[in-house]
Image (cartoon, rainbow, N blue to C red):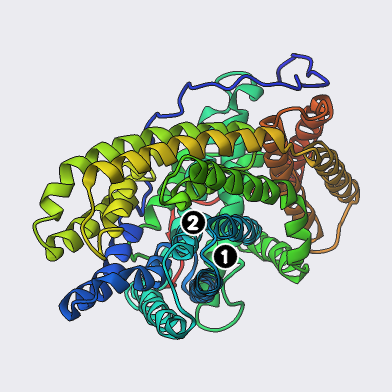
């Protein structure tokens, strides 16, 4: 345990760094899934329109097709619902944009409506955790549609095209289900086990605070796994698979709470066994499993947080989005750019959980878009040889964008930018130089104005949420401590309390990190945060030892008689 004394506050102004902003990460394990799904969803409608000589309608079909980018990390039952809501949300935003475009051609009004739509889309996507890619794709479609000349009589047909493509995107997203029906939940569980193994392996090599980021990443992976598993049906043929995976996620939680008692290699062996379609490993401690699943049942019985309560803390981000997008669009209009929605979308893409992350995204966006403009200059002569080549270039860039964006946002933007420019030429070829200039100017304007709006609109609620998270963590720790003091707590009670404490500590770390990236906020209670985390993790370790549930119990790695 480090003896460093925690500080009681933070500087109201924080330095914005460029270090690591453009650094490439390892690609996502499933990078190819959204990339292939995107191509599979976009290609048939575009090729059909090409054959019919109506490629000018591709914007409407792409609105539905791009929904295939969503929900790849969700179990198929939850994915079906999520994709349906994404399609409806996409069509709803498109409908508002088309109706507005048919009623007025006033550019200021169009930009204002686009900014308000972007704010609503941002808030809803963040509150429901729909993403990646979150609100950016929805905002791109609705903003572009605002500036397409429209009549009321055309709207039903255009929405029908989007809906038909959306149904196809839904089918594409659900297509892997018959082949590997438990793939998403197995991947989420494996990621939790690997993250816990990383922390267990690092523990003991230095001060505990040195490994706090690894521990936080482990708890985040565990929480992501629980969100995935809790979205599965509680009864039926899939329940046995779900319970087997739940036991493994509990083992990951236990490893995070008591890393000194953990064998990292065993966790990695379990994670490796979850790859493919083999049997699910068993933890080898049936009595403990029963108690653990009682704790899971307690979490299932808890009511979900209402949507309106999740939207409340996002109000500052929504205001930032509305103001930044509107000002970016107005600035573009003032410069005489014919497509102010490019600046609007650039601003909408910037806004992250706090100002520091927004700064990083602004740098990534500018670098990626400017590099993409140069790539467009190289691709445009080939694409202009024929509409078929134009469509094929767009499909290739679509694949490249989704394949590369998990390495770093700027790298994916290198493909997104020329793709967006080529899409504008579906209705007819345009001067390459003019397109490049307008896109470059709009990118810089959107990033500058959007970031300035983020600086002006401060998130003063961040400090309050940290206080609330500290209080929640303290209460969860006290509850677990009371149960530890009892000689024989009720079955499942201690497990439920331990898991509640783990959730509270995860929320505390995420809230503190988010608040630490804001500017001009009041001093954060850093000392309380550090002390709450230290005492909370000590209580977690005591709970684990009390239950005598350790990851290295049992001999060897056995498997459940459960097939995926």
Q: Are marks 2 and 1 in contact (CB under 8 Å)?
A: yes
User: What is the crowding at mark 1: few (fewer than 14 residues within 10 Å), some, or many (at least 20)?
Assistant: many
Residue 363 versus residue 300 in the image, above or below: above
Answer left or right for 405 relative to 109.
left
**Where on the picture, by quarter, is residue 289?**
bottom right
| Residue 252 visible in this rendered orientation of the protein | no
**Residue at (57%, 36%) from the top-left corner?**
449
Real-space CA distance between mark 2 and mark 1, rounded to the nearest whole angstrom = 9 Å
Residue farthest toward the left in the current orientation of the protein? 385
Horizontal side of residue 485 vs 255, given as left or right: right
Q: Does dot 1 land on a helix, a strand or a loop? A: helix
Q: Is residue 404 above or below residue 174?
A: above
What secondary structure is found at the residue carrying circle 2? helix
Tell me the tag on residue 110: none
Circle 2 crowding by C-alpha within 10 Å: few under 14, some 14–19, many from 20: many
Front residue of 345 and 434: 434
On the image, the x and y values in percent for residue 486 come to 91, 51
Q: Nearer the viewer, residue 357 or 341?
A: 341
In the image, 79 versus 539, the foreground residue is 79
Using residue 161 as the reference point, say whether residue 290 is left or right of it. right
Front in this rendered view, residue 529 or 365: 365
Q: Position of residue 30 (x, y in %)?
A: 36, 54
Q: Which residue position is annotated with label 1?
A: 229
Q: Answer yes or no: is residue 45 visible.
A: yes
Residue depicted at x 60% and y 44%:
327
Label annotation for residue 188: 2
| Residue 43, image x, y percentages | 24, 69
Q: Farthest top residue?
A: 4
């Amino acid at each position: 345990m480090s003896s460093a004394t925690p500080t009681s506050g933070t500087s109201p102004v924080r330095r914005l760094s460029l270090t690591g902003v453009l650094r490439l990460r390892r690609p996502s394990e499933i990078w190819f899934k959204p990339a292939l799904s995107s191509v599979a969803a976009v290609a048939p409608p575009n090729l059909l329109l090409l054959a019919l000589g109506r490629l000018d309608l591709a914007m409407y079909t792409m609105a539905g097709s791009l929904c295939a980018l969503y929900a790849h990390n969700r179990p198929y039952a939850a994915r079906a619902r999520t994709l349906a809501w994404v399609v409806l949300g996409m069509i709803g935003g498109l409908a508002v944009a088309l109706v507005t475009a048919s009623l007025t051609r006033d550019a200021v009004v169009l930009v204002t409506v686009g900014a308000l739509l972007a704010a609503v889309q941002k808030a809803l996507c963040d509150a429901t955790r729909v993403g990646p890619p979150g609100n950016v794709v929805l905002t791109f479609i609705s903003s572009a549609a605002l500036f397409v000349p429209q009549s009321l009589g055309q709207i039903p047909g255009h929405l029908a095209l989007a809906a038909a493509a959306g149904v196809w995107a839904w089918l594409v997203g659900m297509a892997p289900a018959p082949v590997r029906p438990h793939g998403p939940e197995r991947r989420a569980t494996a990621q939790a086990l690997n993250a816990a193994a990383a922390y267990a392996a690092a523990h003991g090599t230095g001060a505990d605070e040195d490994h706090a980021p690894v521990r936080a990443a482990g708890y985040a992976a565990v929480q992501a796994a629980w969100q995935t598993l809790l979205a599965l049906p509680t009864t039926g043929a899939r329940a046995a698979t779900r319970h087997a995976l739940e036991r493994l996620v509990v083992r990951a939680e236990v490893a995070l709470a008591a890393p000194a008692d953990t064998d990292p290699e065993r966790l990695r062996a379990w994670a490796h066994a979850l790859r493919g379609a083999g049997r699910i490993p068993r933890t080898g401690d049936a009595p403990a499993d029963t108690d653990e699943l009682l704790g899971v049942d307690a979490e299932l019985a808890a009511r979900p947080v209402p949507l309106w309560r999740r939207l409340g803390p996002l109000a500052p981000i929504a205001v930032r989005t509305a103001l930044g997008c509107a000002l970016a669009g107005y600035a573009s209009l003032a410069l005489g750019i014919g497509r102010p929605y490019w600046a609007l979308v650039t601003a909408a893409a910037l806004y992250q959980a706090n100002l520091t992350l927004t700064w990083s995204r602004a740098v990534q966006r500018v670098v990626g878009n400017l590099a993409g403009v140069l790539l467009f200059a190289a691709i445009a002569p080939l694409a202009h040889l024929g509409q078929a080549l134009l469509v094929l270039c767009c499909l290739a860039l679509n694949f490249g964008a989704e394949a590369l964006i998990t390495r770093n946002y700027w790298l994916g933007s290198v493909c997104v930018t020329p793709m967006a420019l080529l899409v504008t030429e579906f209705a007819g070829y345009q001067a390459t130089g003019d397109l490049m200039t307008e896109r470059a100017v709009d990118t810089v304007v959107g990033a500058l104005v959007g970031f300035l709006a983020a600086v002006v609109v401060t998130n003063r609620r961040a400090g309050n949420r940290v206080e609330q998270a500290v209080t929640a963590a303290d209460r969860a720790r006290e509850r677990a401590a009371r149960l530890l003091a009892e000689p024989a707590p009720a079955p499942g009670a201690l497990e439920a309390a331990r898991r509640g404490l783990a959730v509270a500590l995860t929320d505390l770390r995420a809230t503190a990190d988010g608040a630490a990236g804001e500017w001009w906020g009041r001093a954060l209670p850093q000392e309380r945060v550090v002390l709450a985390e230290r005492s909370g993790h000590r209580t977690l370790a005591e709970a684990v030892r009390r239950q005598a549930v350790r990851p290295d119990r049992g001999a060897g790695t056995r498997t459940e008689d459960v097939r995926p």
